[in-house]
Image (cartoon, rainbow, N blue to C red):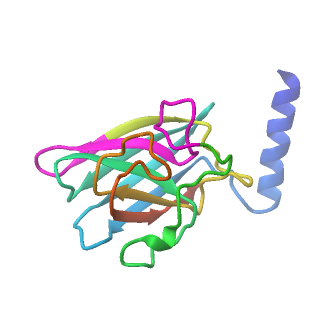
Amino acid sequence: MKTIFVLLMSFCVAAIVRGEDPVIGGVVMLQPASGSQAKGTVIFNKTADGAKAVVDLEGLKPGKHGFHIHEKGDCSDPKAASAGGHFNPEHKHHGGADTAERHAGDFGNIEADASGKAHAEVQLKGVKFDGADSIIGKAVIVHDKEDDLKTDPSGNSGDRIACGVIEPMR
């Protein structure tokens, strides 16, 4: 335990010396894509085994919508195609947030109520905020349709209706 504490303190000191605070999570401002009105926020809070995502959206059609992290932090295309495919550094098959086999960016579905609003708090195991497999700088995409949680590459979840880039929280 003492060794872990010393290592943790060393990393904190190194970050301070470099002028950086450690990343404690990420924040996303989702903007409409593909002619939709969908928008909202996602806040990723670092946990011991990944992250807790707090999602608040509006302007959705009622029902379920696929919700994923994509490989590129680029939402410049009107249809958000510039965000690339699902973030999948381990080259796994598509799944949901709770399935054993899944892309690192597979978070399943978020459900909008009759007014088009959605709120969810999702535990995401294995999410990283630093290193080669970090989600920082990647895009979050909300899709038009429900993710079937099995079909590669995107669960037949349809058009990309909202896009935003994950910025670090320090």
Instruction: Specify the quadrant that holds the C terminus.
Output: bottom right
Q: Position of residue 21 (x, y in %)?
A: 68, 54
- Say which quarter of the image contains residue 47: top right
List the single residue furthest toward the left.
114
- Say which quarter of the image contains residue 80: bottom left
Left or right of residue 32, residue 4 in this image: right
Query: Camera-side residue: 38 or 26?
Result: 38
Give the residue at x 78% y 54%: 15
Could you tell me what secondary structure mostly forms the magenta stretch?
A: loop
Q: Position of residue 77 (x, y in %)?
A: 42, 78
Determine whether 30 is above or below 118 in the image.
below
Query: Camera-side residue: 73 or 83?
Result: 83
| Residue 109 inside the magenta-drawn segment | yes
Give the residue at x 33% y 58%: 158
Magenta residues?
A: 93-119
Q: Position of residue 165 (x, y in %)?
A: 49, 64
Give the residue at x 18% y 54%: 61
Left or right of residue 43, residue 32 in this image: left
| Residue 167 inside the magenta-drawn segment | no
Query: Camera-side residue: 49 or 34?
Result: 34
Determine whether 64 is above or below 169 in the image.
above
Give the residue at x 77% y 55%: 16
Q: Position of residue 99 (x, y in %)?
A: 50, 31
List the single residue furthest toward the top.
1
Instruction: Specify the quadrant that holds the N terminus.
Output: top right
Left or right of residue 156, residue 46 in this image: right
Determine whether 52 is above or below 112 in the image.
above
List the single residue furthest toward the front.
151
